[in-house]
C-alpha cells in the first residue's frame, strides 16, 4: 500500500509540474496601438480698432439701446436716445491662424461697465456679408498667417439715468477651428 501511495504522490507531483510547465511556456502576446497627434497653427487675435459709439446722452429717464451695423451706422432706440457727436467706429479685429483650416466665429457678452452691457453683435469676416454672430456662429475661411479682418459692430443696452462718463463694456470674440 505504501508503494501505491508513493506512486499516487509521484503521479500528482508530476501532473502539477507538467501543468506549471505548460503554463510557463505559454507565449506572451503584445499589441501595438497608434497614438494620434495633430499639430496646428494657433489662432491669435489683435484689436486694430475698438468699436466706439461716439458721444451719447446721459441721464435719460428710460433705458435705451444703440445698435451698430458693420457699415458704422448706429440706430438708437428709446426716448431721447441719440448719437450726439463723434462718428461711430466699427471694431476691427485681425485674426491670424492656419492657412488651410476654416474657422467659426461667435460673440458673447462680456463684463458690463457702468451699467452698460453688450447685448448683440454683427460681424463681417474677410469682406463678407454681415451677420448676427451673437446668436449664430459665423463660418469663415482659413485666416492665414498674415491674418484676416473681422468687423465687429455691437449693440449696447444703457440703463435709465446713465451717469456721465466713459464706459467700456466688453464683447468676447470666440474663434475656433471647424
Image (spheres, rainbow, N blue to C red):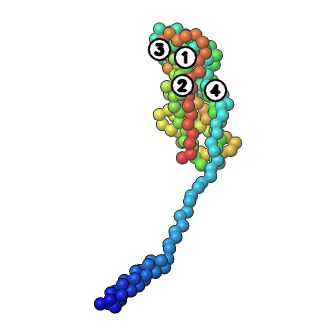
Question: Could you tell me how far apart the alpha carbons at marks 2 and 1 are, in whole angstroms?
Answer: 10 Å
Name the residue furthest right. Answer: 146
Along the line of sight, the residue nearer the viewer: 158 or 140: 158
Kindly state the secondary structure of the residue where label 4 is placed: loop
Q: Earlier in the sequence, mark 3 or mark 2?
A: 3
Rounded to the nearest angstrom, the CA distance separating label 3 from label 2 is 18 Å
Q: Give the x, y percent position of residue 41.
A: 64, 47
**Distance between the Cα atoms at labels 1 and 3?**
13 Å
Q: Residues within 10 Å of mark 3 (few under 14, many from 20)?
A: some
Residue at coordinates 52% horizontally, 68% vertically from top-left? Answer: 31
Residue wearing tag 1:
114
Residues packed near mark 1 inside 10 Å, few (<14), some (14 to 19) or many (20 plus): some
Q: How many numbered circles does the render carry?
A: 4
Q: Residue at x 64, y 39 (%)?
A: 44
State the image coordinates of residue 157 (x, y, percent, origin top left): 50, 20
Can residue 78 be seen from the camera position used here? no
Location of mark 3 (residue)? 63
Residue marked by disc 4? 50
For mark 2, what is the residue?
Answer: 111
Amino acid at each position: 500500500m505504501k508503494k501505491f501511495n508513493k506512486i499516487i504522490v509521484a503521479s500528482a507531483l508530476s501532473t502539477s509540474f507538467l501543468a506549471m510547465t505548460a503554463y510557463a511556456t505559454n507565449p506572451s502576446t503584445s499589441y501595438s496601438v497608434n497614438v494620434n497627434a495633430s499639430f496646428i497653427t494657433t489662432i491669435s487675435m489683435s484689436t486694430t480698432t475698438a468699436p466706439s459709439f461716439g458721444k451719447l446722452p446721459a441721464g435719460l429717464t428710460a433705458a435705451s439701446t444703440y445698435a451698430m451695423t458693420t457699415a458704422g451706422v448706429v440706430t438708437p432706440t428709446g426716448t431721447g436716445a441719440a448719437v450726439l457727436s463723434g462718428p461711430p467706429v466699427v471694431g476691427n479685429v485681425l485674426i491670424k491662424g492656419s492657412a488651410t483650416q476654416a474657422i467659426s466665429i461667435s460673440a458673447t457678452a462680456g463684463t458690463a461697465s457702468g451699467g452698460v452691457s453688450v447685448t448683440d453683435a454683427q460681424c463681417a469676416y474677410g469682406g463678407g456679408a454681415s451677420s448676427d454672430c451673437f446668436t449664430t456662429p459665423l463660418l469663415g475661411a482659413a485666416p492665414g498667417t498674415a491674418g484676416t479682418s473681422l468687423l465687429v459692430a455691437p449693440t449696447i443696452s444703457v440703463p435709465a439715468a446713465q451717469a456721465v462718463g466713459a464706459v467700456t463694456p466688453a464683447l468676447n470674440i470666440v474663434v475656433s477651428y471647424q
